[in-house]
């Protein structure tokens, strides 16, 4: 039995409280990024689903295609590409605000901190790319939240108490700046020390190369127990806000084992008896994550069926289309699911459950192995279907698996609602006091 009081206590910790507020605040940015990423993957990518189905290379002009590609890729870059910058600012701001410090100055200081770390970890300083994009993008949002929280704590201990003023004079603002000088200088010194450490040791902070060994192992292992363990690690990192492994696995997988599986399927006309039946890259992307949308899409369906909160229902409606096509970040950020203790175990155990059921079905020859390449933007529920070259048993199996995920998540949603109610009551009591 999950103790609601314990979850409420965790959620009331300053880190989780500030993180939840930060993520919810950034929901509009995540929404814009999700929709334009969906548009880019479906329409303006040569390996996109709609692009190939409708043969858009023959239908639309090159000028229109390049313009659409430029706009969609650009919006994705200024939303998801520097999402960590926004997260760091608001995390520091909300942390400082919890302790009644100058939140605006804390946010500005946090931006300086993370930008210098991104500069130090950049490997292309001789080109126009001055900052490491991997440190600033949404797949590394956890480190941005940690930096923002650290800056907020420095303001807590070294900054002076601050009460917002409705109409500030220039002199008042100057006073605020001088009062923030000590914590800001301490943060700047710490960022320089950390930057030198990163630069000298050539550390790549939370980017895809940092997880190369993990990703490579997932892609080539055919050991089911190892696949299960790696699934736990990857799903935990994804809940934490480190999405690089999931992002890489959801793309095109090129390795000798997957190539051998595909070659066998092309030679024999099916993938029932391929050499590597439990390849990690195939099982995790196709069944554990269903292209990245399994848990998130199931939660959206449940909330649409039973939730009475108009704001939550609106969020589910906005998130449904991109989530159906595997762009789930608007919902994981907006609810939020990321860094929410209520969804920690479901985010790990449900993909593990899906993987085990799928592996059992493959062992019993109920479904073939998924080996064929998948176009970008393919809906998560159809990823195994296309991965098996249109096997209908696989489609039925995937739908049943998704329905079972909904059943498993139903009590978790009830628990989440009870936790939210307790938090609202505690907040109301603090206001009344």
Image (tube, grey):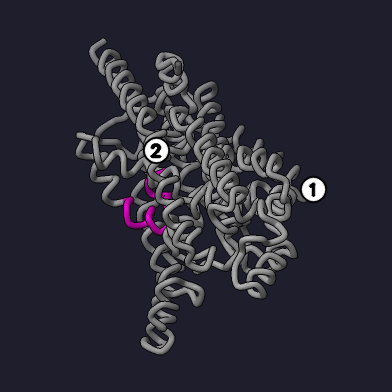
Quadrant position of the C terminus in the picture: top left
> What kind of secondary structure does the magenta stretch mostly adopt?
helix
Q: Position of residue 311 (x, y in %)?
A: 23, 40
Q: Point out residue 59 in the picture as x, y percentages from the top left corner.
A: 36, 88
**Residue at point 42%, 27% (across, down):** 17
The residue lying at 29 percent from left, 30 percent from top is 165
Q: Which part of the image, by quadrant, shows the N terminus?
A: top left
Q: In the image, is residue 271 above or below residue 132? A: below
Q: In the rendered structure, which disc, 2 or 1, sits on the residue that comes first in sequence?
A: 1
Residue 385 drawn at (x, y percent):
47, 61
Q: Is residue 321 magenta?
A: yes
Q: CA distance from mark 2 to mark 1?
A: 37 Å
Q: Which residues are magenta?
A: 319-332
Q: Quadrant of residue 392?
A: bottom left
Left or right relative to 412: residue 232: right
Mark number displayed over residue 336: 2
**Residue that lies at the very extreme toward the right in this rendered image:** 201
The residue drawn where x is 43% and y is 35% is 93
């Amino acid at each position: 039995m999950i103790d609601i009081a314990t979850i409420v206590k965790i959620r009331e910790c300053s880190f989780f409280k500030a993180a939840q507020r930060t993520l919810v605040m950034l929901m509009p940015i995540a929404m814009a990024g999700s929709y334009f990423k969906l548009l880019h993957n479906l329409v303006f990518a040569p390996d996109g689903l709609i692009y190939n189905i409708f043969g858009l290379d023959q239908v639309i002009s090159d000028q229109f295609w390049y313009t659409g590609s430029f706009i969609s890729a650009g919006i994705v870059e200024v939303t998801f590409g520097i999402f960590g910058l926004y997260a760091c600012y608001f995390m520091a701001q909300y942390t400082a605000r919890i302790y009644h410090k100058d939140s605006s100055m804390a946010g500005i200081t946090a931006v300086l901190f993370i930008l210098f770390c991104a500069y130090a970890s950049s490997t292309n300083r001789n080109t126009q790319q001055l900052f490491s994009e991997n440190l600033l993008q949404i797949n590394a949002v956890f480190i941005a939240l940690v930096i923002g929280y650290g800056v907020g704590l420095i303001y807590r201990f070294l900054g002076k108490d601050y009460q917002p003023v409705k109409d500030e004079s220039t002199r008042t603002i100057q006073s605020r700046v001088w009062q923030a000088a000590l914590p800001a200088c301490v943060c700047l010194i710490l960022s320089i020390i950390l930057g030198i450490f990163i630069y000298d040791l050539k550390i790549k902070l939370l980017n895809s190369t940092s997880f190369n060994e993990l990703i490579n192992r997932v892609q080539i292992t055919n050991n089911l127990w190892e696949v299960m363990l790696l699934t736990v690690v990857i799903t935990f990192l994804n809940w934490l806000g480190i999405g690089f492994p999931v992002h890489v696995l959801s793309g095109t997988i090129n390795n000798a084992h997957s190539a051998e599986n595909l070659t066998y399927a092309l030679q024999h006309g099916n993938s029932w008896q391929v050499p590597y039946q439990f390849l990690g890259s195939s099982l995790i992307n196709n069944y554990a994550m269903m292209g990245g949308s399994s848990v998130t899409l199931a939660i959206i369906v449940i909330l649409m069926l039973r939730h009475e909160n108009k704001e939550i229902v609106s969020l589910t409606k906005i998130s449904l289309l991109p989530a159906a096509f595997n762009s789930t970040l608007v919902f994981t950020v907006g609810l939020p699911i990321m860094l929410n203790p209520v969804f920690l175990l479901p985010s790990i155990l449900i993909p593990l459950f899906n993987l085990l059921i799928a592996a059992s079905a493959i062992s019993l020859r109920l479904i073939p192995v998924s080996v064929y390449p998948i176009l970008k933007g393919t809906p998560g529920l159809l990823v195994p279907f296309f991965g098996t070259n249109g096997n209908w048993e696989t489609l039925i199996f995937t739908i049943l698996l998704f329905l079972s995920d909904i059943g498993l998540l139903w009590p978790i949603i009830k628990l989440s609602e009870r936790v939210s109610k307790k938090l609202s009551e505690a907040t109301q009591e603090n206001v009344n006091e």
